[in-house]
């Protein structure tokens, strides 16, 4: 489980730093960026599959699962495609704080799905943390003055994606390759249509933009592989705790680097969410330390 926690923490840290990358190509339409993310991610994964014998062995071993795996991975592909689009659109429209709120809400979705669907149990302190975080999110929604649709959409799509990946049968690498493969042809068709219409950015927008669009494959693939591995190794509720890493980094980038407005009422709401994270962290540390203490007592 410790290995899964580290993979999850690494994935969320990289995702938290994503605004630094996407704002470099904010002049490009979000849908075009997402099409490049999908296409180049699939290419990167295929190269890795061919270059790594262990991944080829996994593919051969899991080939019998392929036919029964299409449905969950098709759903995962749609969910992650929508999530990518909303996130890039939000970041490139000056809504980094708003997107961070979405990923602050996502752990609540993960925890609730873990309890409702996977029958995972929560300790009292974890329930308390969920209640505090829920009140913080509700306060932020009221202070916002309207329903924060992009935040809620990001939370629901990525939370459900985590559940689908948790129950999916293939290994992390093969599953992600199948997901991007499902979206590859539609993405390439869209890029060809844009190119024929004379609106394509690739090659035409300069070497820097072209390299950044192509690099989206590597940038996208690494944290997704880490996340997929973590989702299969640790409980969904623990994954929900780690989720707070990403929006916290995004929040600080939005406020201190991109100078987005942040009011006192927002500070109060975020404070409640951060309090919930603290409760989660302390409870998790105590729970993991207790077995070690019991083991020492046996001697």
Image (cartoon, helix red, strand yellow):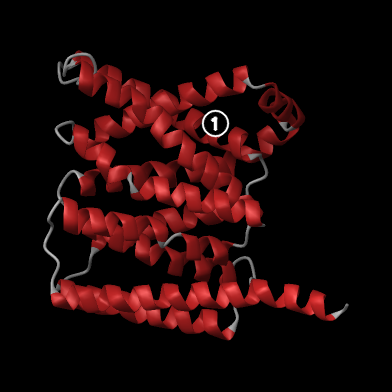
Q: Is residue 128 left or right of residue 287?
A: left
Along the viewing direction, whichever of 119 and 99 lies nearer the viewer: 99
Where is residue 247 drawn, in percent x and y?
A: 34, 58
Q: What residue sits 46% from the left and 58% below the top?
A: 159
**Disc 1 secondary structure class:** helix
**Residue 153 falls in which quadrant of the image?**
bottom left
Number of marks drawn? 1
Along the viewing direction, whichever of 80 and 204 lies nearer the viewer: 204
Q: What residue sits 64% from the left and 51% below the top?
A: 3
Determine if residue 181 is in view: yes
Q: What residue sits 17% from the left and 71% below the top?
A: 144
Q: Is residue 108 left or right of residue 295?
A: left
Q: How crowded is the residue under tag 1: few (<14 C-alpha within 10 Å), some, or many (20+)?
A: many
Along the viewing direction, whichever of 172 and 72 lies nearer the viewer: 172
Determine if residue 194 is in view: no
**Residue 274 falls in which quadrant of the image?**
bottom left
Where is residue 98 drawn, in percent x and y?
A: 23, 59
Question: Quadrant of the image for the N terminus?
Answer: bottom right
**Residue 135 falls in which quadrant of the image?**
bottom left
Where is residue 239 drawn, in percent x and y?
A: 53, 60
Where is residue 232 drawn, in percent x and y?
A: 63, 51
Q: Measured along the vertical axis of the image, is residue 55 above or below residue 5?
A: above
Q: What residue sits 41% from the left and 36% below the top?
A: 220
Q: Is residue 47 left or right of residue 251?
A: right
Taking the view exactly as shown, the residue that stands out farthest to the right is 299
Q: Measured along the vertical axis of the image, is residue 9 above or below residue 280?
A: above
Question: Quadrant of the image for the C terminus?
Answer: bottom right
Q: Which residue is mark 1?
A: 177
């Amino acid at each position: 489980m410790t290995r899964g926690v580290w993979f999850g923490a690494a994935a969320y840290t990289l995702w938290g730093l994503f605004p630094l990358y996407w704002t470099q190509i904010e002049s490009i339409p979000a849908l075009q960026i997402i099409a490049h993310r999908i296409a180049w991610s699939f290419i990167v994964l295929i190269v890795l599959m061919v270059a790594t014998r262990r991944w080829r062995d996994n593919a051969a071993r899991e080939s019998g699962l392929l036919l029964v795996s299409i449905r969950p991975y098709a759903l995962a592909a749609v969910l992650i495609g929508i999530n990518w689009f909303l996130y890039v659109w939000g970041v490139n429209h000056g809504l980094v704080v708003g997107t961070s709120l979405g990923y602050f809400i996502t752990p609540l979705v993960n925890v609730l799905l873990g309890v409702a669907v996977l029958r995972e149990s929560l300790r009292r302190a974890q329930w308390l943390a969920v209640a505090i975080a829920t009140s913080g999110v509700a306060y932020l929604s009221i202070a916002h003055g309207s329903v924060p649709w992009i935040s809620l959409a990001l939370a629901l799509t990525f939370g459900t994606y985590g559940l689908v990946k948790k129950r999916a049968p293939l290994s992390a690498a093969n599953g992600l390759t199948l997901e991007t493969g499902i979206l590859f042809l539609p993405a390439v068709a869209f890029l060809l249509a844009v190119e024929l219409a004379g609106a394509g950015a690739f090659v035409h927008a300069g070497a820097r933009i072209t390299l950044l669009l192509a690099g989206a494959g590597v940038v996208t693939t690494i944290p997704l592989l880490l996340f997929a591995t973590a989702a299969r190794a640790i409980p969904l509720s623990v994954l929900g705790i780690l989720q707070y890493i990403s929006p916290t980094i995004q929040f600080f980038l939005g406020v201190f680097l991109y100078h987005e407005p942040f009011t006192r009422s927002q500070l109060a709401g975020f404070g409640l969410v951060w309090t919930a994270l603290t409760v989660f962290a302390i409870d998790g540390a105590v729970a993991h330390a207790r077995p070690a203490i019991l083991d020492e007592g046996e001697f």
